[in-house]
Amino acid sequence: MREWIVTFFGAGKSPIAPGTVGSLLTSALLFAAFQGIHTSLWFNLLLIAGMILASIAAVMLGPWAIGHFGRKDPGPFVLDEVAGVCLTMLLLPLRAGWHELSVVITAFVAFRIFDVLKPPPCRQLEKLPQGWGILADDLMAAVYANLLSQLVIRFLLG
């Protein structure tokens, strides 16, 4: 059960780019959720709840995952990506139609860029103990990704 949770329903078990697969699954699920919600308030509340739940699970299950997978920041562990994608999409301007897909794609790409590049202080945050280090660098990358997404969406995608 724990492995199923930390790999986000198995997405983290992808043999190629498990963090990207976990981020993609999260983005697809959030896109589908918005189709049923269609209001920014409820969607943002969903994002906050998703970020909090994934963050709590990441911190609580981080020590187990480190032992289970035998690495400090195990690749199959993608709850940090789930929390990061939720934070990246928070408060982005969503409207029904083609625009919402472009917003989700922009947020996904921006998050992956910052999660891979790890600009300061992301790399330093990885050094935090246990689940905190696994999670904190992704949340910081998400802050950068959110800011970039806000700019791109508001000024380029209008």
Image (cartoon, helix red, strand yellow):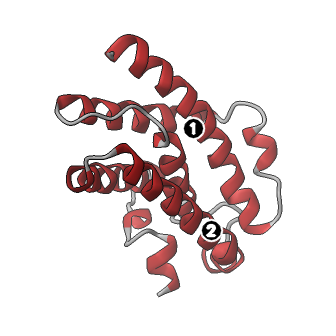
| Left or right: 89, with 38 as reference point | right
Q: Residue 10: x, y in percent?
A: 38, 71
Instruction: Residue at 43% x, 68% y: name it.
Output: 8
Between 48 and 75, the residue placed more toward the observer is: 48
Instruction: Residue at 37% x, 12% y: name it.
Output: 156
| Left or right: 28, with 61 as reference point | left
Q: Residue 2: x, y in percent?
A: 52, 83
Quarter of the rendering containing residue 132: bottom right
**In the image, what residue type sits under mark 1?**
Val
Judging by the rendered image, the residue that carries numbered circle 2 is 58
Judging by the rendered image, the residue that carries numbered circle 1 is 116
Using a 10 Å C-alpha cutoff, classify the residue at mark 1 as few (fewer than 14 neighbours), some (14 to 19) or many (20 or more).
few
Quarter of the rendering containing residue 74: bottom right
**In the image, what residue type sits under mark 2?**
Ala
In the displayed structure, 77 sits above or below 137; it is below
| Left or right: 117, with 88 as reference point | right
Instruction: Residue at 42% x, 12% y: name it.
Output: 155
- Which mark is drawn over residue 36? none
The residue positioned farthest toward the bottom in the image shown: 1
